[in-house]
Image: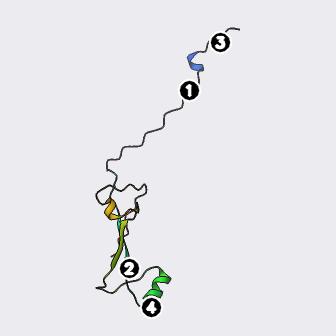
Amino acid sequence: MPTPVLDQHEFPRAPEPAALPEPNDEPEDLSHSWVVAAEIAVQERTAKLADFRGSFTTDTGIRVDALEVYCRACRRPYEDVADADCEALDRQPAPDRR
């Protein structure tokens, strides 16, 4: 049996290529978002409030002992990655609390 000859219009079409994303003029921000795990001595009343609310306000001049300084996004210690770009996929800036 002879092989049928197909016209060029009878071949299935290749799918359209996916559209490329628009180039972004601004470079991606790869900076770390530094946070400090801290230890603050408080009175029992403040401890109870902090336990209930998850936060509290300190008095002016209270010394805060830094237990650890790390990047909020990649969770790596400051001393290990201070001079490198953040490698986290989902970078969110540290909250600005003044």
14 in relation to 93, above or below = above
The numbered mark, 3 or 4, whose residue comes first in the sequence reads: 3
Residue 13's disc number: 1
Q: Are marks 2 and 4 in contact (CB under 8 Å)?
A: no
Of pointers 2 and 4, the one earlier in the residue sequence: 2
Label 2 vs 3, first from the N-terminus: 3
Q: Residue shown at 35%/47% (left/top)?
A: 24
Residue at image mark 2: 39
> Contact (CB < 8 A) between labels 3 and 4?
no
Q: Residue at label 3? A: 4
Mark 4 Cα shell of 10 Å, populated few (<14), some (14-19), many (≥20): few
Pointer 4 residue: 45
**Nearer the N terminus, badge 3 or badge 1?**
3
User: Which element is circle 4 on?
Assistant: helix
Q: Of discs 1 and 2, which sits in the foreground?
A: 2
Q: Could you say which is closer to the camera, residue 73 or residue 97?
A: 73
